[in-house]
Image (spheres, helix red, strand yellow):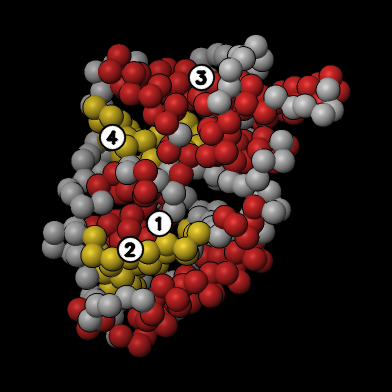
């Protein structure tokens, strides 16, 4: 087995993955959403303190023979430095006490393997990675050759949902909240701009976010007692998804790669999934989604990614394992 630890942001998670058949033997995650919701976003110092409480709690609940663990895998990049360090410290302690090797895993690469949790990986594959911190279009020729095709020029897809939800005082995380309100929209008279209406293969959400802010202010001035939350959420979500769809379409029409994967916490949006399924069908691509339970940050995907590293004996020494909040493995 490989024991894996994920603490890159605000989810504490530990998993056990079977090396020979990829079976997920154990997975548990403790979310911090309730603690951060009152602030409308993640407070790093609170996240770090909660990881120091939650990770040992999860570890103590594991009912497996630790003598069967062959390696400890841990996310060490990218992420919040104060959160990453909590997982890395636990990984080092376990490696030292059990006298087994360490494996350092890039969080974004872990998301790719959320598509293949209990099965063989498929390469080559194109990947759309949408999360609270990243919006990336990737091409993975194999486990080692992963290239960034497009990225965001400013905010990420998930981040923009969080910020608009905060403008509306709807809480955190914003993605599921805005999706919920958007489904309730009866009137659909608000139209927000679509970002980057050109041939540039990139994402941008800051302008759309600002347009949503101006619309909220206009609605508030019109009637300070009534804000049409559902209609604003619908308009914002529609524009954000249309933007993603247009850029993915621009990419797919020139791509010969058969498989197209969609991963990351923000990829759980069902309206987005419907749009991407339609696009993939138009271009004769086979679309793959991470299971909804494993879209957001989790140790199961880190462990699955670590199996590949273990089989290639890609271990790292205690003195070499460090955190890299902003690094990228992608070329």
Left or right, 313 with reference to 11: left
Residue at which label 3 appears: 242
- The CA distance from mark 4 to mark 3 is 20 Å
Decide: few, some or many residues near mark 1? Use Cα within 10 Å; few <14, some 14-19, many ≥20. Answer: many
Kindly identify which numbered label has been placed on residue 298.
Answer: 1
What residue is at 62 percent from the left and 14 percent from the top? 187
Decide: few, some or many residues near mark 3? Use Cα within 10 Å; few <14, some 14-19, many ≥20. Answer: some
Quadrant hosting residue 50: bottom right
Front label number (2 vs 1): 2
- Residue 125 in view: yes
What residue is at 38 percent from the left and 24 percent from the top? 274
Kindly identify which numbered label has been placed on residue 288.
Answer: 4
Residue 262, position in %: x, y? 36, 36
> Compared with residue 65, is residue 203 higher up or lower down, i.e. above or below?
above
Task: Tell me which numbered mark, 3 or 2, is placed earlier along the sequence.
Answer: 2
Task: Tell me which numbered mark, 2 or 1, is placed earlier along the sequence.
Answer: 2
- The CA distance from mark 3 to mark 2 is 35 Å
Left or right, 5 with reference to 303: right
- The CA distance from mark 1 to mark 3 is 28 Å
Decide: few, some or many residues near mark 4? Use Cα within 10 Å; few <14, some 14-19, many ≥20. Answer: some
What residue is at 36 percent from the left and 76 percent from the top? 61
Left or right, 77 with reference to 17: right
Helix, strand or loop at disc 3?
A: helix
> Compared with residue 205, is residue 147 higher up or lower down, i.e. above or below?
below
């Amino acid at each position: 087995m490989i024991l894996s630890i994920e603490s890159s942001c605000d989810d504490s998670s530990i998993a056990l993955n079977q090396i020979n058949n990829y079976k997920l033997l154990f997975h548990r995650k403790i979310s911090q959403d309730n603690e951060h919701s009152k602030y409308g976003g993640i407070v790093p110092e609170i996240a770090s303190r909660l990881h120091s409480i939650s990770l040992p709690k999860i570890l103590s609940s594991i009912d497996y023979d630790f003598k069967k663990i062959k390696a400890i895998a841990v996310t060490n990049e990218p992420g919040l430095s104060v959160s990453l360090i909590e997982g890395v410290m636990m990984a080092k302690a376990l490696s030292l006490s059990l006298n087994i090797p360490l494996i350092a895993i890039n969080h974004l690469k872990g998301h790719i393997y959320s598509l293949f949790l209990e099965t063989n990986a498929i390469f080559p594959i194109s990947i759309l990675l949408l999360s609270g911190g990243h919006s990336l279009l990737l091409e993975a020729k194999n486990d080692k050759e992963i290239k960034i095709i497009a990225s965001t020029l400013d905010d990420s897809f998930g981040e923009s949902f969080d910020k608009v939800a905060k403008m509306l005082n709807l809480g955190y995380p914003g993605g599921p909240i805005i999706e919920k309100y958007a489904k309730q929209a009866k009137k659909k008279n608000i139209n927000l701009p679509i970002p980057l209406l050109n041939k540039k293969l990139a994402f941008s959400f800051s302008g759309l976010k600002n347009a949503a802010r101006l619309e909220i202010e206009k609605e508030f001035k019109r009637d300070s007692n009534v804000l049409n939350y559902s209609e604003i959420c619908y308009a914002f979500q529609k524009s954000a998804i249309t933007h993603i769809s247009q850029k993915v379409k621009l990419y797919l029409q020139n791509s010969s790669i058969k498989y197209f994967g969609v991963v990351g916490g923000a990829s759980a949006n069902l309206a987005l999934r419907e749009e991407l399924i339609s696009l993939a069908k138009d271009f004769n691509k086979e679309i793959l989604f991470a299971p909804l339970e494993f879209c957001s940050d989790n140790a199961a995907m880190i462990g699955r990614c670590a199996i590949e590293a273990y089989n290639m004996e890609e271990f790292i020494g205690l003195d070499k394992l460090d955190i890299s909040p902003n690094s990228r493995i992608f070329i």
